[in-house]
Amino acid sequence: MWYIIFAVLTVVAHYGLWKLFVKAGRPGWEALVPFYREYVMAQLTGRAKWIVVLLLVPIVNIFIFYGLYLDLIKAFGKRRFWENTAAVLAPFIVLPLWGNDPLVKYLGNPNSEEFKKKYFYKKSMARECRCDCFCNSCSIFNSWFFD
């Protein structure tokens, strides 16, 4: 029974990722191919392409994947704490919502200086630490129990 629920939630999350890739100007099928999806995410977020190789290294792959994933979410203007948390804990809910929301647009490479100047976002030091600790612990929890 759990396998059926997990399969349905995975399909729904991939549907949302498909829609986000289309909004970013990429073919939707790219969201379905493992490793190539992360390569495309690296392109969309301005990360080095070779970072995809680190996905083959145990433990390191968790941090690399969620770093790419959160950067992709940031490229769509989703930078608040609850948005990052929801994207990690409930991608099957938020990805389809954001993918079908006409107000959510691909803003560009979130790691470029132009992006940082154009879409300035100031976080407090406490929020920065809280977000990093919580997102890392959520990603580890998610990877251990759901992947």
Image (cartoon, rainbow, N blue to C red):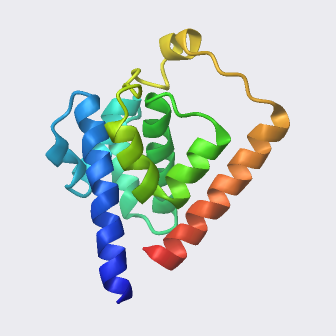
User: Residue at 34% of width from left, 31% of height from top?
Assistant: 44
For residue 139, above or below residue 114: below
Frontmost residue, 97 versus 20: 97
The quadrant of the image that shows the C terminus is bottom left
- The vertical placement of 8 against 38, above or below, is below
Q: Quadrant of the N terminus?
A: bottom left
Q: Residue shown at 50%/70% (left/top)?
A: 143
User: Extreme bottom residue here?
Assistant: 1
Q: Is residue 106 above or below residue 143?
A: above
Is 12 left or right of 118, judged from the image as shown? left
The quarter of the picture where residue 45 lies is: top left
Question: Would residue 80 be visible to someone looking at this image?
Answer: yes
Residue 29 percent coordinates (x, y): 15, 47
Q: Nearer the viewer, residue 33 or 77?
A: 77
Which of the 4 image quadrants contains residue 127?
top right
Q: Is residue 100 left or right of residue 107?
A: left
Horizontal relation, residue 98 to residue 4: left or right: right
- Where residue 79 sits: x, y (%)? 58, 33
Identity of the residue drawn at 50% across and 16% down: 115
Q: Is residue 63 visible?
A: no
